[in-house]
Amino acid sequence: MNDGYVDVLSSIASSSPTPGGGSVAALSLAHAHSLAAMVSRLTLKSDKWSKGHEIANDIVEHSQARINESVSLADKDAAAFNAVMAAYRIPKNDDNSTERSNSIRKATIGAALAPLETVNAALQLLKQLLTLSSVCNANALTDLAASAELAQSAAYIAQMNVRINTQYINGDDVDSIDSETDNAIAVCNQTMLELRSIYMERLGW
């Protein structure tokens, strides 16, 4: 691993609250996309796995964009948290109480929407992996499994970061965020069950 990678880990390990769990969720998703691309490339290397070439090509074609998007989501999550902290630092006084409350609410909504993007992105990858799982290079099944488990973990971590923000505010927009998150996680869970069944059966475990 190069120094840049170690620097990221050191940044996470520092006493600063950012980057935190939401950013780590997005970075986990970036790793999941990277592994999915590797499995896809190994599948494309042989005609033996020709049934998997269509989905493998699709994953490879968009893999770098998805990795970049995941890294951007990590930055977005950190920025959203910092915006909440900045809103809370607005001085309290009678003249700006409404403005301050509105700023806090707006920032908190943003801090919930950022990890929701990670949840939805993780779900899309899990759906692709489900298609790939039954037709990929059998020698790369544990790597596919690792990609899926990382994507599922990313979704769960991101879900917690949605909820830690929405629990403090109310409104139709908040209800919509919670509902979208819960629905996406439910589909993630079902997709993951199907994925595990397929790769465990193919592995003979």
Image (cartoon, rainbow, N blue to C red):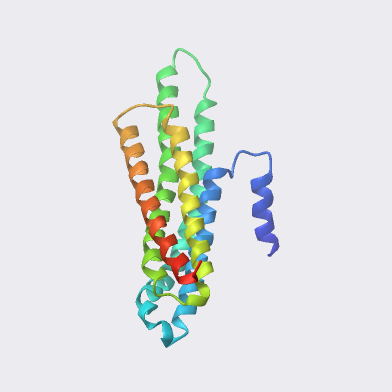
* Number of numbered tags placed on the structure image: 0
Identity of the residue drawn at 48% across and 76% down: 138
Residue situated furthest bottom in the rendering: 47
Looking at the image, residue 92 lies above or below residue 118: above
Residue placed most toward the observer, 167 or 129? 129
Q: Name the residue at 32% across, 33% down.
A: 175
Asked if 95 appears above or below 2 in the picture, the reply is above
Q: Residue 142: x percent and y percent?
A: 53, 68
| Quadrant of the image containing the N terminus | bottom right
Is 9 on the left or on the right of 23, as rendered? Answer: right
Across and down, in percent, residue 9 comes to 66, 52
Residue 147 lies left or right of residue 198; in this view the side is right
Q: Quadrant of residue 46?
A: bottom left
Is 145 situated left or right of 134 in this image? Answer: right
Q: Residue placed farthest to the top in the image?
A: 94
Which residue reaches farthest left?
A: 172
Q: Is residue 115 above or below residue 98?
A: below
Q: Position of residue 157 (x, y in %)?
A: 50, 45
Residue shown at the point (36%, 42%) measured from the top left? 182
Q: Closer to the camera, 84 or 46?
A: 46
In which image quadrant can residue 108 be found? top left
Residue 184 at what x, y percent from top left?
35, 48
Along the line of sight, the residue nearer the viewer: 20 or 157: 157
Q: Residue at x 36, y 37 (%)?
A: 178
